[in-house]
Image (tube, rainbow, N blue to C red):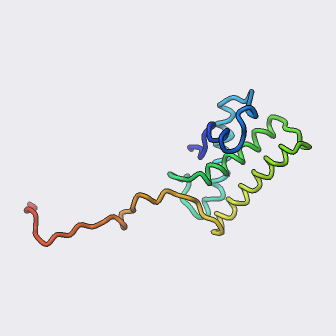
Amino acid sequence: MTAYATESELTSLALPTGALRGVSSDDIAAVLEEASQEADSYLRARYAMPATSWGKDLTGAVCRIAAWRLLVRRGLDPESAAYQAVQDDAKASIAWLRDVAVGRAHLAVDTTAPSASQAPRVVTRTARGRWI
């Protein structure tokens, strides 16, 4: 499975780079994939998973869930304000995923490419060549 977020997106959307000092890229990738699988578990109620295209809404939710998991593993002080803020962000992301699952919210997906049923048809009045 492909994760819905990258390490660079994690540091731009959910955590400053310094917060992950000492955490290997492999560990970060594993947690991003784990958070993506959790997202799939909610989204599967309405969408074919895994998604083939997605927006920053899903990427951000996965980043916030992964940030929480990474900082808990690092031993973030549960009494700190940072702990509470990251936990609140993760909980809000899970709540949003639940809302998407039941239809109260919707994923931002790429709809620029028309489906086969929406593709334009070309009709001419004159036959153009012979089919053998």
Question: Which quadrant holds the C terminus?
Answer: bottom left
Q: Residue at x 65, y 49 (%)?
A: 60
The answer to which image quadrant residue 79 occupies is top right
Look at the picture and state if 31 lies above or below 94.
above
**Residue farthest along the right direction in this orientation:** 79
- Residue displayed at 30% across by 66% down: 120
Residue at x 59% of width, y 51% of height:
56
56 left or right of 69 in image = left
The quadrant of the picture occupied by the N terminus is top right
Closest to the observer: 30 or 119?
119
Up-down relation of residue 30 to residue 105 (above or below): above
The location of residue 46, given as percent across then percent down, is 59, 64
- Comparing 23 with 50, the one in front is 23
Give 103 or 125, whichever is nearer the viewer.
125
Q: Quadrant of residue 92?
A: bottom right
Residue farthest to the top, as pictured:
22
- Residue 118 image offset from top left, x and y in percent: 37, 67
User: How many numbered marks are there?
Assistant: 0
- Above or below, comparing residue 80 to residue 42 in the picture: above
How far from the left and from the top, in percent, is residue 7? 63, 37
Q: Residue at x 73, y 42 (%)?
A: 67
Q: Is residue 95 left or right of residue 130?
A: right
| Left or right of 119 on screen, residue 3 | right
Estimate the x, y position of residue 75 in percent, counting from the top left: 84, 36
Determine which quarter of the picture holds residue 127.
bottom left
